[in-house]
Image: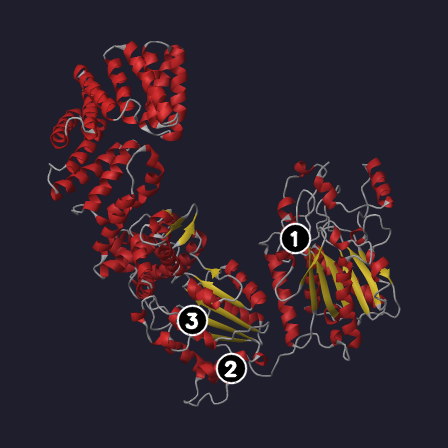
Amino acid sequence: MCPFKKLFKPAATPQQHAAESSRSSSPSQAPTVSFPDGVKVLHDNSEATVDICFVHGLTGNRDTTWTAQGQSQPWPLALLAPQLRSARILTYGYDAYVVKRSVASSNRLIDHASNLLNDLTTDRASHDASDRPLIFVAHSLGGLVCKESILQSRNNPEGHLKKMFECIKGVIFMGTPHTGSWMADWARLPASALGMVKSTNKSLLKVLETDDQLLESIQLRFLGMVRDLRESNRRLEVTCFFEELPLPVVGKVVSKESATFAGYNPISIHANHSDMVRFVSPEETGFKRVIGELSRWEMELRSSTQNEASSSTEPRPSSSRKAIFTVPFEPDPHFISRESILSSIAQQLEQHRRAILCGMGGIGKSQIAIAYAYQYRQEHPRSHVLWIYAATRSRFVQACQQMARKLKLPRCEDPKIDACELVAAWLDDEENGPWLLIVDNADNANLMLGVMPSDETHMDEDTLTKPLMDYLPRTLDLSRRLLITTRYNDVADGLRQSALPISVGPFSLPEARSLLRRKITKERAGPADETVDELLTSLAYIPLAITQAAAFINRNMMTLADYLRGFQTSESERMRQLSIELQDPRRERGFPSSVFRTWRLSFDQMRQRDPAAARLLTFLAFLDGQSIPLTLVQYTQTAEADWRQALGTVAGYSLVVSAANETISIHPLVQESVRYWLEQQKEKEASVEQAVQVLAARFPTGEYSNWIVCQTLLPHAQAALRHQGRGILSESRRLLQYLVSWFLLASGKYETAFEHVSESYEILMGLYGDEEPVSLDSLARMALVLPYRGKYEEAEAINRRVLAGREKELGVDHPSTLTSVHHLALVLQDRGKYEEAEAMIRRALAGREKELGVDHPSTLTSVHHLALVLQDRGKYEEAEAMNRRALTGSEKELGLDHPDTLLSVYSLAHLLDVQQDFQQAMDLYETAITGFDSVLGPDHPTTAACREHLSSLLRRMA
């Protein structure tokens, strides 16, 4: 049996079972009304002083939703009516079936709300109850229907339909998904997956998606109505109940967070979503909690000397004064609406009275705040909208002086009066609402919070005087709200009280395209979308960068393609263009309007406040921007607390973001700006050298056990080496080049490995000369790469030179000397000098057995290569014995998945192939390929060679 059938079909009465049976027996007969709809009077009362209307939820029923299993009557009639003797009790039904056997109703939520308004108005008029106070008790989706119905009544031009809003006393929400429900995801499953499910009311389901705009609009408009009523001294009671228990199989339907909202007392019911509205006894705790709220409201109605419900159809302004609007910018005709952020601002202001926009400079925080200010003025024409620019103390004071004059505060013209204190006192007085205060560019932690810098020698007057946060109201309410913009998380954390800051990031690609197209003329844009996207990617989708580029194009009468060509010429040219100050009337006068200069303020402030964080930022500027491991960041500081604090500061400036798997990322445009900043201060060379030093100390050798770390650090090492450039005689650069070449050789990237090892050797020659042992190491690494480039003769010469040098410096039995003997044997084999190759590899093997032991991995490598030489000389029996010895030893010492073990498998397969033992050879080839695919990757040259040998064998077998 499908569990969802039990979940979404209410318990049926015997009569409903009979009706269902009748319908089942006559499938050709179309059903009539399959749900009881409209208003039903459960309990009439000619002396009632209040109407209580129950509204069911998703897939509910006006009778069965409120009837517990085994009970003959719904509890509002059986339990509530005897205790609330002054109430007339109603229940309302509508087709809220998401799934059922017949075709789902096409009614939308707003249609259900409209029907509720009309049907309830008609019923109350027919019972001479149009002016009677009204209370809703709503379950699940019914709560959304009630909210929308009340809102429709409030704005209705018809006097009789406006009565609902005039008379509404309160609403009890029971498991209502104010911010969405996961059932919308469930109900999108195909009907075939749910057995009996035949149809879906898509519009009802869409409302329950957590990002649905209609749901959000209903919630915001409802909370706004409640606020306006409160401002006019009329209170709408609201109580939210939430379920404590999950439903079988599917879990909780509506979470506590979704079923409640800030500012109202949440109350739990120890039941699941369906049973939370089905009570059996008046002794049940859930029933006591519900009737407790209803009884309190009824008592307030009886004791009231004035009928609140019929007092006024619209809230009255708190004073006769004209609303003041001090935003210093006009609306932007080119503004790209960022609806999700604007909605988040509205939601946080409704729930927490305070919202903070946080993001890097140039990301568009101020433009969003301006757009929201105009939107707020339109929605709240009686509310002041006040703007303070808080980048400096002088501008803050200036804004307060202007605000005091606008508000005509007492003694505002007196030069002895502190205008900031005057405005602060006015903001703290709750009688002065409603207002929205926007504090823009709250970017200085010293100034805003009074935070001491880590280096006390850099204290300034902002550190030693009263922080600006002390002038902002600490307590807010529905009529007083605060919106702040800042670049820095530490400022946001210091100013927020509950909700997390709203993060403002770069545009999406479609948003970035729209802004660029609006800012430049069609002639300058050109036809190629590829050019547009390429430029936008280079500009990181940052609004200020796009605006600046568009202004440059327009001013210089260029095409977009011309601008892009110049932009891509070099990093210094990009930074030069992004440093040009172009007058922007939508940015504060006297402050940077270019991307680089805007960010440079952050860089300078970071260096002053937290030098360790500035050093970390310069280090990050020379890495690959993506997937920077925290282990690498950690290596830049001596103590964990130090590097975590430094990273926290950089992240607090919105210059890096957290990524997956303990990594961070930084955008290339930010990196370029940091490098340009360092170049201007003549610090770039020293900074990149420090980055190379860290990487050289952190990059491991190329043994198989280090491959994961090598792969993680490789892009960062290559980026740092690239930024430093060739020709630098640095030991750190030499070592890093050598280590990188080691791993690249193991990875089969022979050409790139040769480039790195060649430069490593050049640096060595410049630093030490060619007789040092470390020079011999680089030569040896180069000799390993040369055969892959077809330069066997040169490889032999270098190997002989390295061997002679090591015999002289270290002795004939030193492990490094024996390694050179082994490598010389390999190149001799490649050149067809099999007899000398066999002698050399036997010498290496004997020396390693003596010095390292017979089971040492290096000894087994010599055993393996001896087998290869013997095979080339036609000594198959001894070659096979050596191969099997190497394979057995490697399996034991290294494991089956080690590359050396897999090479032994591959070599043995090839030997058996040569001896025409095809079946065993095929099995071993397949084993080797499976391992190589996993360990080396399918594109590694060794993997490809093994796969080709197997293909050749299969062709021959066929």
Circle nearer the viewer, 2 or 3:
3
Question: What residue does disc 2 label?
Answer: 425
Quadrant location, the N terminus = top right
Is tag 2's residue or tag 1's residue first in the polypeptide sequence?
1
SS type, badge 1: loop
The answer to whether residue 629 is seen in the rendering is no
**Quarter of the figure with residue 872:** top left
Quadrant location, the C terminus = top left
Is tag 2's residue or tag 3's residue first in the polypeptide sequence?
2
Q: Where in the figure is residue 268, as x and y percent of width and height?
A: 69, 58
Left or right, 401 with reference to 75: left
Q: Amino acid at mark 3?
A: Leu
Seen from the viewer's position, the closer of residues 150 and 631 is 631
What is the CA distance from the residue labelled 3 to the residue labelled 1? 39 Å
Question: What residue does disc 3 label?
Answer: 449
Is tag 3's residue or tag 1's residue first in the polypeptide sequence?
1
Looking at the image, residue 837 lies above or below residue 247: above
Q: Amino acid at mark 1?
A: Val
Taking the view exactly as shown, the residue that stands out farthest to the right is 46
Question: What residue does disc 1 label?
Answer: 254
Q: Amino acid at mark 2?
A: Ala
Q: Residue at x 78, y 65 (%)?
A: 121
Circle nearer the viewer, 3 or 1:
3
Looking at the image, residue 704 lies above or below residue 646: above
Density class for disc 1 (Cα within 10 Å; few <14, some 14-19, many ≥20) is many
Q: Where in the figure is residue 203, as x and y percent of width and height?
A: 65, 51
Q: Residue at x 36, y 11 (%)?
A: 956
Seen from the viewer's position, the closer of residues 499 and 401 is 499
What is the CA distance from the residue labelled 2 to the residue labelled 1? 42 Å
The answer to whether residue 346 is seen in the rendering is yes
Q: Where in the figure is residue 352, as x and y percent of width and height?
A: 56, 66
